[in-house]
Image (cartoon, rainbow, N blue to C red):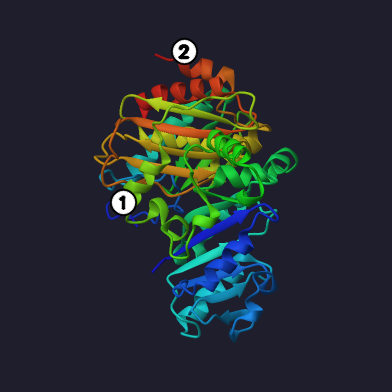
Amino acid sequence: MCGLCGLLGEDAHWTDPLGNDLPRRRERLRRIKAINLVIAPFRLSVADFQGASYLVQGPTGRQEMANGLEQLWHQAESILGRALDPLDTQLLDHLEAQP
Amino acid sequence: MSLLVNVITGFLGSGKTTLLKRLLANEQLGDTALLINEFGEVGIDNLLVEEVAPGTVLLPGGCVCCTVRGDLKDALLGLHDRRSRGEIPAFRRVLLETTGLADPAPILATLNQDLQLRRRFHLGLLVTVVDAQHAESQARLHPEWLGQVTAADRLLISKADVVSMAVVNDLKERLNLLNPSASQAMVTDITSGDDLLLGEGVQGAQAVEEVRRWKLFAPVRESRHSIAQVCCLEFDKPLNWIAFGVWLSMLLRCHGERILRVKGILDVIDSPQPIVIHGVQHCLHTPVHLSTWPEGPQYSRVVFIVRDLDIDLLRRSFNAFLRRLGQVA
């Protein structure tokens, strides 16, 4: 449990914060911001839910809960109906076009 | 206390069992529990053994030998429980022999991701025995061979005595192209207490030494016509861990089957120590904080062994994600 936020936390994952300097909630929000930047071209978005789960939302209003990053990608793909590919050239064009 | 699990794999008939037979004959595996497929294969019937539980025997040297009957998870948990109850000697490590047709990735995933196992065991080295006589045809005909070779931390070449020196040298060269970071040795050179076989790898006290063995900064000959390609990605500035995690987790989710192996050392923002990552296919191990950089360059470098993946696109994706996400995360 995080001593500052009182969060029970997610299942352990290799992407978890490396140090204990920042409160976990702040780390989560930074991660969510990064994920939103990546999935925005697919018209998807992610929000924090209770500091322990993710709420994935699609363009039609469909919403799915996800625990951990693995499930987040899985739910995002199920809303999208296809794979969320980090090698997608349109996604890379979008990321490279940003300032 | 979490117990070490080392895995011995290798294609059918590669000589895993012969190696285990020889190790058992030395009676130096006293603090090791051996998880094997069949007792009969290892030939322990000839040894004076004592059955301590159904499917579990105690060998004269003190080594506990147990068969995997069905589920690997049940076998490991059963072994741990019997150890806790004092029914079998308090072994320090488990040596797990896989079947010849096993793809190591699901075994690693079970050990890494199962909550019950994760608290009790941690993965050490994955050792692959490669048959020098049949490597050529196995590589051509059986995709499991490639999975076993690329997942390995150590490659032990067997049956070198039945082929010419030129064949062995060609095989060594080929293995070096497919998995440059795995140490190679002849199976005949392995003795039972050998650290090459029983070491803890990057999870242990000798982590810096192990990372040095990986030769991450060695120049890579990128062969585009081989059955697998090696791709090195570098980042000259300290990288953002959140951006890296988002990129790699997304990549492994989408292309995990094509990413046979990943190993890397990372210079991460706000981390005074280098971070070491390594994984097989979809499964990445918990990152390790290394006490110090091994001698040589001190910047982030990740080595991928991939199959049917566009290396230029992989490089472009890595740079795009790291640079863009690094600005916001």
Q: Residue at x 51, y 64 (%)?
A: B117
Q: Which chain carries label 2?
A: A
Assign the C terminus of chain B to one quadrant of the image: top left
What percent of the width, then of the height, locates residue B127? 53, 53
What percent of the width, then of the height, locates residue A56? 55, 38
Question: Which element is circle 1 on?
Answer: loop
What is the count of numbered marks?
2
Residue B155 to residue B3: above or below:
above
Residue bearing mark 1: A5
Residue A80 to residue B185: above or below:
above
Q: Which residue is drawn at 71% across and 44% down?
A: B138
Q: Which of marks 1 and 2 is nearer the N terminus?
A: 1
Q: Which residue is drawn at 51% across and 28% down?
A: B231
Left or right: where B305 falls relative to B300: right
Residue bearing mark 2: A97
* Crowd class of label 2 (few under 14; some 14 to 19; many from 20; radius 10 Å): few
Left or right: where B179 falls relative to B143: left
Q: What residue type is labelled 2?
A: Ala
Residue B296 to residue B41: above or below:
above
* Crowd class of label 1 (few under 14; some 14 to 19; many from 20; radius 10 Å): few
What percent of the width, then of the height, locates residue B159? 63, 52
Residue B282 in view here? no
Q: Which residue is drawn at 46% across and 35% down?
A: B246
Question: Which element is circle 2 on?
Answer: helix
Q: Mark 1 lies on which chain?
A: A
How far is disc 1 from disc 2 in space, using C-alphas? 36 Å
Specify the quadrant of the image occupied by residue B50: bottom right
Q: Nearer the viewer, mark 1 or mark 2?
A: 2
Q: Nearer the viewer, residue B20 or B2?
A: B20
What percent of the width, then of the height, locates residue B66? 59, 74
